[in-house]
Image (cartoon, rainbow, N blue to C red):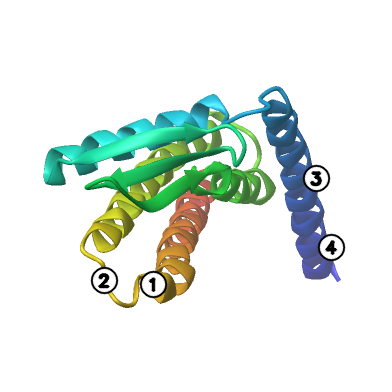
Amino acid sequence: MLMVSKRLAFVFRFLIAFILLSFAYQLYLSFYPTLDPFTSFTSKVVFHILNYAHGNLETISSPETKATIFYYNNKSIFQIIEGCNGLSVCISFVSFVIAYSTVNINAILFSVSGTLLTLIINILRICALGVLYINKYAYVTIIHDTLFPATIYGFIVLLWLFWIRIERRLKEHE
């Protein structure tokens, strides 16, 4: 019975953290009728990396679609929207860390470093996808819809497993 209550407490804490962080993120987005600053920042970083690698790249911000549209050789090849910035995935990551442990300096440091790593992985993932679009790879849509989400979510799961291991070792040393 104790194990069931611990699991329910974990689920409850996860849901509360997830709802509160999601609400805060939606509140943040509500201040921006066009593309939000973080998504814009993500687009700029991706642009600089891809432009360095390939050149002939341009971007245009589209207020109507809340997107940064990428052009290669004057042709639209892909766009970055709010859902591409990785913050929603980070909300899931941080919610798990909060739910699994007590809030302490270790949890805070792990949440911050894990979020930064996730955002870096996300930018590299978008750049890889951009290279596929630039090179007109035949299966880019399938890869965008399956492999690329699996990459970012798989990374989050690995971070969660790593956090569980850290937490167990910390409890053993208490």
Q: Residues within 10 Å of mark 2 (few under 14, many from 20)?
A: few
Residues under numbered marks 4 and 1 in contact, where contact means CB atoms less than 8 Å apart: no
Residue on which the image places disc 1: 143
Determine the CA span between mark 3 and mark 4.
Answer: 16 Å
Q: Mark 2 belongs to which amino acid?
A: Tyr
Q: Quadrant of the N terminus?
A: bottom right
| Residue displayed at 65% across by 43% down | 98
Q: Which one is closest to the eye, mark 4 or mark 1?
A: 1
Q: Secondary structure at mark 2?
A: loop
Q: Earlier in the sequence, mark 3 or mark 2?
A: 3
Image position, residue 67 (x, y; %):
52, 40
Image position, residue 10 (x, y; %):
74, 56
Closer-to-camera residue (25/159): 25
Q: Secondary structure at mark 1?
A: helix
Residue on which the image places disc 2: 137
Q: Quadrant of residue 70?
A: top left
Determine the CA span between mark 4 and mark 2.
Answer: 50 Å
Q: Residues within 10 Å of mark 3 (few under 14, many from 20)?
A: some
Residue on which the image places disc 4: 5
Q: Secondary structure at mark 4?
A: helix
Residues under numbered marks 3 and 4 in contact, where contact means CB atoms less than 8 Å apart: no
Q: Which one is closest to the eye, mark 4 or mark 2?
A: 2
Q: Earlier in the sequence, mark 3 or mark 1?
A: 3
Q: Secondary structure at mark 3?
A: helix
